[in-house]
């Protein structure tokens, strides 16, 4: 499984966040896969956190992979959804809820002025912090560049695994996109590219965990503020979009993200709601 990562203070993570079990690795294939292995352990306290300093086989949605070089923050949370008051109908909203929490944490981190305590990155120190946005259903962007991907999966199988859910998160923190391989694409970015400084990975992780604890409480209680925030952060609002789902393509104008997490697209035949699929803007 790898050896424990020196980057993570397990005791602090348990004391200062809502996680109850922590595994940190120097190198791991996939944190989601490890979380799936843990899901069948009835005695395992949850939420459980699996983090890796270097993830070698990270996965995105579908057949996509996730580039996560040294300096990225990659982790998975194993949630006992039934114990936290979530039902399967809430699961499509968990990805958006996590994206909102990541935006909360990233924006706070970007706004901090800690250059004196951090290693600056040449030629980028003049860039101001940029606002986050959410690209439905599972990406977080800064100034148009993808900084975070989220993968929500059910481990399946018998109880207790079938009542648990895995939330995988990959955030480009100190792995500058200038070092990304060509196959990673041109549209990514990293926190260090935006702020011009290096960031404490554990501090960023704690920020995300605390924000997620708050946002999950909002989801469980039906707090309307949560959907108002993901609507505000919606990157695709009022854009012409192409939605691909089950081998079919649909075009229309994005008019919002509904309270239940559906992407709402206005077409000549009326408004349609999508709960899964991939979407891209066709304005550019």
Image (cartoon, grey):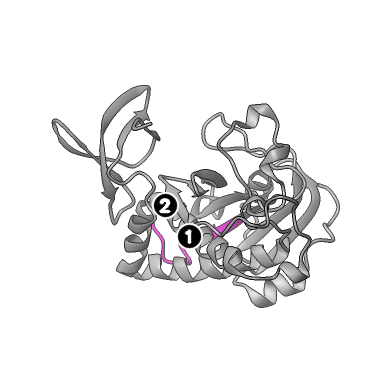
User: Residue 84 lies in magenta, yes or no?
Assistant: yes
Which residue position holds label 1?
81
Residue 232's disc is: none
Q: State whether residue 156 appears in this view.
A: no
Q: Is residue 264 left or right of residue 24?
A: left
Q: Residue 105: tell me if it is visible.
A: yes
Write the residue at 37% across / 64% down.
226
Q: Is residue 227 left or right of residue 47?
A: left
Task: Determine whether, in the image, residue 123 is placed left or right of residue 258.
Answer: right
Q: Is residue 247 above or below residue 89?
A: above
Percent position of residue 49, x then y: 66, 60
Residue that carries the numbered disc 2 in the rendered image: 91
- The reply to whether callout 1 and callout 2 are in contact (CB within 8 Å) is yes
Q: Residue furthest left?
A: 269
Mark pair 1, 2: CA separation: 9 Å
Where residue 137 sits, quadrant-wise, is: top left
SS label for mark 2: helix
**Magenta span dominant secondary structure:** loop
Helix, strand or loop at label 1? It is loop
Residue 92 appears at what percent x and percent y?
39, 49
The magenta stretch is 77-87
Task: Between residue 37 and residue 267, name the one nearer to us.
Answer: 267
Camera-nearest residue between 159 and 188:
188
Q: Nearer the viewer, residue 90 or 201?
A: 201
Question: Which image quadrant for residue 86?
Answer: bottom left
Q: Horizontal and vertical percent for residue 185?
A: 60, 31
Mark nearer the viewer, 1 or 2: 2
Residue 211 included in the magenta stretch of the image: no
Where residue 203 appears, x then y in whole percent? 69, 67
| Residue shown at the point (50%, 48%) measured from the top left | 141
Q: Which badge, 1 or 2, is on the more N-terminal residue? A: 1
Which residue of the protein is positioned furthest toward the top in this rendering? Answer: 247
């Amino acid at each position: 499984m790898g050896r424990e990562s020196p980057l993570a203070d397990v005791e602090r993570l348990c004391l200062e966040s809502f996680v109850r079990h922590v595994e940190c690795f120097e190198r791991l294939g996939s944190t989601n896969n490890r979380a799936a292995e843990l899901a069948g352990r009835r005695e395992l306290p949850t939420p459980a956190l699996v983090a890796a300093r270097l993830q070698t086989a990270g996965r995105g949605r579908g057949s996509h992979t996730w580039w996560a070089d040294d300096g990225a923050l990659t982790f998975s949370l194993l949630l006992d959804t039934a114990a936290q008051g979530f039902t399967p109908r809430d699961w499509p909203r968990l990805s958006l809820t996590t994206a909102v929490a990541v935006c909360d944490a990233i924006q706070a981190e970007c706004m901090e002025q800690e250059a004196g305590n951090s290693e600056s990155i040449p030629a980028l120190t003049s860039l101001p912090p940029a606002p986050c946005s959410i690209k439905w259903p599972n990406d977080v962007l800064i100034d148009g560049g993808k900084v975070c991907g989220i993968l929500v999966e059910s481990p399946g199988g018998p109880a207790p695994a079938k009542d648990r859910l895995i939330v995988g998160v990959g955030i480009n923190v100190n792995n500058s996109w200038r070092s990304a391989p060509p196959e990673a694409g041109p549209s990514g970015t990293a926190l260090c590219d935006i702020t011009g400084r290096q960031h404490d990975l554990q501090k960023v992780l704690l920020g995300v965990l605390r924000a997620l604890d708050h946002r999950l409480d909002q989801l469980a209680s039906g707090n309307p503020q949560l959907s108002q925030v993901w609507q505000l952060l919606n990157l695709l609002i009022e854009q012409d979009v192409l939605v691909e789902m089950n081998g079919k393509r649909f075009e229309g104008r994005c008019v919002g993200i509904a309270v239940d997490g559906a992407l709402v697209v206005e077409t000549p035949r009326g408004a349609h709601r999508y709960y899964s699929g991939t979407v891209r803007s066709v304005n550019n």
